[in-house]
Image (cartoon, coloured by chain):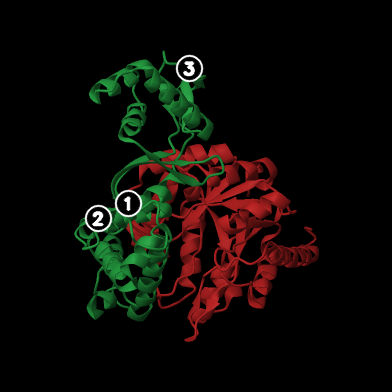
């Protein structure tokens, strides 16, 4: 057997051979059984690639295998996964890849990746930690499902599926998890987006939040506004986006 | 000796709950002794996985098997993870929890695979310390799983079994004995898997795993959990059961998951092996 370095160094070296873009023969030989450590490199990378492709299928297709592979390799080399939760691995890839995607000649590409990852995340968000709720009341703080993401995109990446003829936005999206665990996307107008944003967290009663958003948007709280608000709240309650008011 | 709580868990053949088969499995609720789950798939997660877990808990006894604690890590524990895990183990009422005798990362980076540790005194000290610390923090019976490994870690492949025995004794630990991993390692490194099993004190074994594996074109066997169990693993399981006695045995299938009927056919074949092995020991 080769004389091995101390355990901590050995483990760091092993991870380097898995993640570095081009480890040398010497890097593998330091670990002892160089040929078999190459097997580990191949297994680790294949597994991580699979979960990233599962989370970002449209982005991968748009990029093509080679370009996606380049982003993947750069990510592993420069910022390998720091989460123990396998399902969160694609978040790390996207965080690293976004600046690169944002510079792509296709201006919608970064939005597409952000949208795909938001839907991936919404399906998994933990929604058990909600305060006790009662029927919706304007006098108390609203409670929203934690399985909700608000996302602003510049292109209609949430609409087209097979072609890339996206319409220029902006689009304000609410992506939430339905009762049958699907990620559902709704388009909101800017006022609705601001309202939903204002309803997350905090201790203010619903009335105050609505009043503040209306003021910020120079919108009169008239009969039409109140009817639209009522319809929106009823719809959001039906969908499980609004759960009620804090009890 | 096994503790009263450990000994009271149902013996027999259980199945790993995997997303690809979970809905149909829970709709049909076939007869299996228990279900095993990976806590990392449920911690800090809602949605469908949580619903599947809740349905499982209503019908089956549950054992937990971790993926990322890895007792051979040289890095300190993530206390948040241990805190969440402890809460989860209590919620699912598992009598013990197991994780792997390997490392899966270092310095906060995760490989999301099971990487081998050398069978050295330094590694042994690390494992014993980490195992003890985890058991204290989780306040539950803890077991380690022997892993498949592909890069030689010593000149004598039976050193792995000796290493396991040292951990068992120094940490007063339990082992979740993966019979397929012993078989895979025996073929990859050329040793008698029964000699490996013979070195393990039977009273330290709380549970067993069996699975299928891939044989590559170059002959290297990889523990994919993606193939049917081969005859050699059935034979080794029977030998191990005769030696160890009745324990919960889990069928692991993580990839190329077949129909539920095919999975249950494997469970039934395992049950036949289980009964035959224990009849000869008078423990059935």
Subunit ID for the residue under disc 1: A
Question: Considering only vertical position in the picture, is B123 above or below A190?
Answer: below
Seen at 25% across and 69% down, the residue is A20
Seen at 56% across and 49% down, the residue is B64
| Marks 3 and 2 close (CB-CB < 8 Å) | no
Question: What's the colour of chain A in the image?
Answer: green
Indicate which disc residue A114 carries.
1
Seen at 75% across and 64% down, the residue is B268
Distance from label 3 to label 1 (Cα)?
Answer: 35 Å
Task: Determine which residue is flagged by label 2.
Answer: A98
Provide residue A71's location: percent of width, then percent of height. 27, 65
Question: So how many labels did they put on this image?
Answer: 3
Is residue A91 shown to the viewer in this render? yes
The quarter of the displayed image where residue A52 is located: bottom left
Disc 3 crowd rating (10 Å Cα; few below 14, some 14-19, many 20+) is some
Question: Considering only vertical position in the picture, is B115 above or below B52?
Answer: below
Subunit ID for the residue under disc 3: A
| Mark 3 or mark 2: whose residue is earlier in sequence | 2
A180 on left or right of A97: right
Q: Which chain is red?
A: B
Indicate which disc residue A247 carries.
3
Frontmost residue, B17 versus A211: A211
| Mark 1 or mark 2: whose residue is earlier in sequence | 2
| Marks 1 and 2 close (CB-CB < 8 Å) | yes
Disc 2 crowd rating (10 Å Cα; few below 14, some 14-19, many 20+) is some
Provide residue A122's location: percent of width, then percent of height. 43, 44
| Helix, strand or loop at mark 3 | loop
Question: Considering only vertical position in the picture, is A67 above or below B100?
Answer: below
Quadrant for the C terminus of chain B in the image:
bottom right
Frontmost residue, A169 versus A64: A169
Is residue A124 shown to the viewer in this render? no
């Amino acid at each position: 057997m080769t004389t091995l370095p101390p355990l901590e160094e050995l483990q760091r070296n092993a991870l380097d051979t898995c993640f570095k873009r081009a480890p040398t023969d010497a890097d593998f030989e330091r670990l002892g059984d160089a040929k078999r450590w190459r097997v580990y490199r191949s297994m680790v990378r294949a597994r991580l690639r699979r979960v990233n492709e599962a989370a970002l299928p449209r982005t991968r297709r748009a990029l093509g295998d080679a370009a996606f592979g380049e982003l993947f390799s750069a990510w592993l080399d420069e910022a390998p996964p720091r989460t123990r939760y396998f399902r969160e691995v694609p978040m790390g890839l996207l965080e690293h890849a976004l600046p690169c995607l944002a510079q792509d000649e296709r201006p919608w590409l970064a939005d597409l990746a952000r949208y795909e990852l938001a839907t991936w995340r919404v399906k998994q968000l933990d929604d058990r930690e909600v305060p006790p709720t009662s029927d919706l009341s304007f006098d108390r703080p609203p409670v929203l499902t934690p399985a909700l993401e608000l996302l602003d995109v510049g292109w209609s990446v949430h609409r087209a599926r097979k072609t890339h003829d996206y319409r220029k936005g902006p689009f304000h999206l609410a992506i939430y998890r339905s009762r049958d665990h699907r990620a559902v996307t709704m388009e909101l107008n800017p006022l609705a987006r601001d309202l939903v944003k204002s309803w997350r967290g905090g201790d203010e009663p619903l009335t105050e939040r609505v009043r503040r958003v209306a003021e910020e948007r120079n919108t009169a709280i008239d009969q039409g506004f109140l009817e639209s608000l009522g319809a929106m709240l009823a719809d959001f309650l039906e969908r499980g986006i609004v759960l009620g008011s804090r009890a | 000796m096994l503790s009263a709580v450990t000994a009271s868990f149902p013996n027999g053949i259980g199945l790993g709950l995997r997303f690809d088969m979970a809905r149909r499995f829970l709709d049909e609720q076939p007869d299996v002794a228990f279900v095993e789950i990976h806590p990392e798939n449920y911690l800090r997660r809602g949605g469908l996985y949580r619903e599947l877990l809740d349905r499982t808990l209503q019908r089956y006894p549950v054992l937990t098997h971790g993926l990322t604690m890895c007792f051979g890590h040289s890095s300190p524990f993530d206390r948040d993870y241990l805190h969440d895990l402890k809460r989860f183990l209590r919620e699912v009422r598992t009598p013990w929890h197991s994780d792997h005798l390997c490392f899966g990362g270092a310095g906060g980076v995760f490989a999301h695979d099971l990487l081998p540790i050398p069978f050295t005194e330094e590694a042994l000290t690390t494992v014993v310390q980490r195992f003890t610390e985890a058991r204290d923090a989780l306040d539950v019976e803890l077991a380690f799983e022997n892993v498949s490994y592909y890069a030689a870690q010593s000149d004598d492949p039976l050193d792995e079994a000796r290493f396991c025995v040292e951990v068992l004794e120094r940490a007063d630990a339990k082992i979740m004995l993966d019979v397929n991993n012993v078989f895979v390692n025996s073929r990859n490194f050329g040793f008698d898997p029964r000699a490996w099993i013979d070195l393990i004190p039977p009273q330290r074994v709380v549970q067993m795993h069996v699975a299928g594996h891939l044989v590559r074109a170059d002959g290297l066997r990889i523990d994919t959990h993606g193939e049917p169990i081969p005859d050699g693993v059935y034979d080794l399981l029977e030998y191990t059961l005769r030696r160890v006695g009745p324990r919960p045995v889990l069928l692991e299938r993580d990839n190329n998951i077949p129909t539920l009927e095919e999975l249950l056919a494997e469970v039934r074949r395992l049950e036949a092996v289980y009964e035959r092995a224990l009849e000869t020991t008078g423990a059935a």
